Image (cartoon, rainbow, N blue to C red):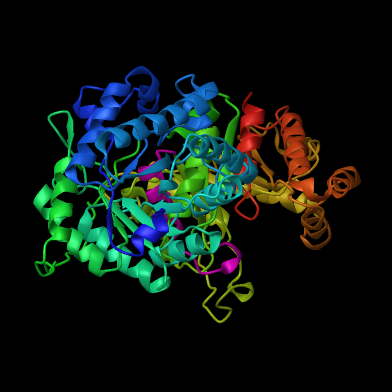
Amino acid sequence: MNLIEKISEKTLIADGAMGTMLHARGIGFDKCFDELNLTNPVSVAEIHREYIEAGAQLIITNTFSANRYKLSKHGLQDDVVDINRAGVELARRVVAASYKDVLIAGDVGPLGVRIAPYGRVKLEEAREAFAEQIRALADAGADLIVIETMSDIYEIQEAIKAAKETCPLPVVASVTFTRDDRTLLGDSPAKVARRIAEAGADVIGVNCSGGPSQLLRILKQMRQAVPNGNFWVKPNAGWPEQVGGRIMYPADAEYFGDYALSFREAGANIVGGCCGTTPQHISAMKKALESSLSTFEVLETPDVSDEDSAEPAEQLTQFAQRLAEGKFTISVEMDPPRGLSTHKLLAGASLLYDSGADVINVADSPMARMRMSAWAVCDVVQRKIGVETTLHFPTRGRNLLRVQGDLLAAHAIGLRNVFVVMGDPTSIGDYPEATDNYDLVPSGLIKLIKQGFNAGIDHSGTSIGQPTNFFVGAALNLCPQDVETEVKNLHRKIKAGTDFFLTQPIYRADDGPKLIEAYESKHGKLNKPILAGVLPLVSAKHANFLHHEVPGVFIPDEARKRIESAGENGSRVGVELAVELIQGIKNWAHGIYIMPQFHRYDMISEIIVAVKE
């Protein structure tokens, strides 16, 4: 009888954690647990046997990280097939020795790398890696495939496709959630359930995450979204805590037994445990499900996240230090989210930082569209990713009171890099009737910050207690229609105290020297660092739009021809053109200011890695 037939008759009991049990046997988390199938099969077999004796009717192979990407961290990327085959064969021998009807699930975890559009690994590459592992598990005799602990819908969809294309086995697809009942990329349980069902999974799952209370809540939302689905639930033994150097889980076995009944009533077809659970937890669930006791009523309590306090920034920002030391600096612009969730933004920022970006610029209501406050986003990015940010600070829509209050708030939460701009007129945005007044032009605001706040006084000359320490940037157009006016504005901003300049996007490396020469011929040496704007092209349509419809943007004929001839590979040529441009820019600029299009952070990552080499 296969999985689907079994769960149509009763709720199955799956096993608990493998990693927790291995660690309890003295195996460090720095070791490759999957390799133990070959090097220490006895320990793995003992754990399988303990779970079966506790009542598990389904056990999962010790292959959670046995894909080419994760194994490569241990130099084992060529052993994918051997490790997965050994995992299934080992489980099969234990089941045979138990003389019990127990299903073996081939375990497939995340690849451990970010995939497009939030990573450099392409979707087809991810699917190929999953297929390699799943094929090995199926060929070795697994009864089903379990894809678990996923946090990215794109990744789990590719894993499901790989499973369906590779073997005829039933597929369980299980996702993990954060404390706010969202995935790391901000997707809700209902959305996840629908996407998993649409991708073709036979069982929709939720695992890891928090304890049973949270997963019961998520299970109910999933089942409401897909009423006729089959469901799998494997919670952690609560949120982990570090005690005396050890990772401890608070939920005991009896507590799990109580929740097993609630899971069944909420529609779970398979229940088990994840991190921190043991054979005792599984035994308690088995006894509870087999009993005739009424369902234990669970009072759910809301999750309360720890409040993070902003840490004070250093007196001289890392961004300022790099420019002062003459190091070529890479800044990347990101837009705040339109709603409450920052998960996708943080995933993109993490990818950019890991790739080598030195600072993240956060735009403020670009195109006058309603978005989350830019200084709040800067705070979240700096705290959670650890990369320094530059706050875009438009003067439009702010009177003197608002300007100064916002500056104090930004400084209080640790923001020091500020990019002053006029801002987009509200007439082009979501609320064209909104007030568009302002008391200061950019050069005036720069003067207020550098000669006022940084000296410890506000606009009226009143003390603010202590000086701020803002590092202030301003905008520069390297391809103006009126060169004389641009030079005049540039000089005014320098006199006001501007520390650095970010430019509009250019597509010719020699655009910069022309304007710089025009300035220096009139005002002498331009001794302020310039980060040249780079806006990578993603397609011929994109290139033509920018060239023909965006004022101040000129894309050479050769570049447009190259991207047009590339067809569907336009983004690849866009990366090549950007890298070539940046190599030319290095001759005169102090860095680059990259503006991603359509959230293609994977493209930007490739560009950063290429120019860093």
Residue 541: give x, y in percent of width and height. Answer: 80, 58
Instruction: Please tell me in which quadrant of the rendered image residue 216 appears.
Output: bottom left
Image x and y of residue 25, in percent? 20, 24
- Secondary structure mostly seen in the magenta stretch: helix
Residue at 46% across, 59% down: 202
| Residue 235 horizontal side relative to residue 156, left or right | left
- Residue 437 makes an appearance in the image: yes
Q: How far across and how far down the image is residue 435, in percent?
A: 52, 77
**Vertical position of residue 445 compared to residue 129: above or below:** below
In this rendering, would 297 be left or right of 5?
left
State the residue in front, 250 or 416: 250
Q: Is residue 405 visible?
A: no
Quadrant showing the N terminus = bottom left
Q: Which residues are magenta?
A: 366-387
Q: Quadrant of the C terminus?
A: top right
163 left or right, relative to 182: right
| Residue at the extreme front | 99
Q: Residue 39 versus residue 501: which sits nearer the camera?
A: 39
Residue 13 or 111: which is nearer the viewer? 13
Query: For residue 78: magenta?
Result: no
**Residue at horizontal 42%, vertical 27%?**
86
Residue at (70, 38) in percent of width and height: 523
> Closer to the camera, 89 or 439?
89
x and y, in percent, of residue 572 in the image: 75, 41
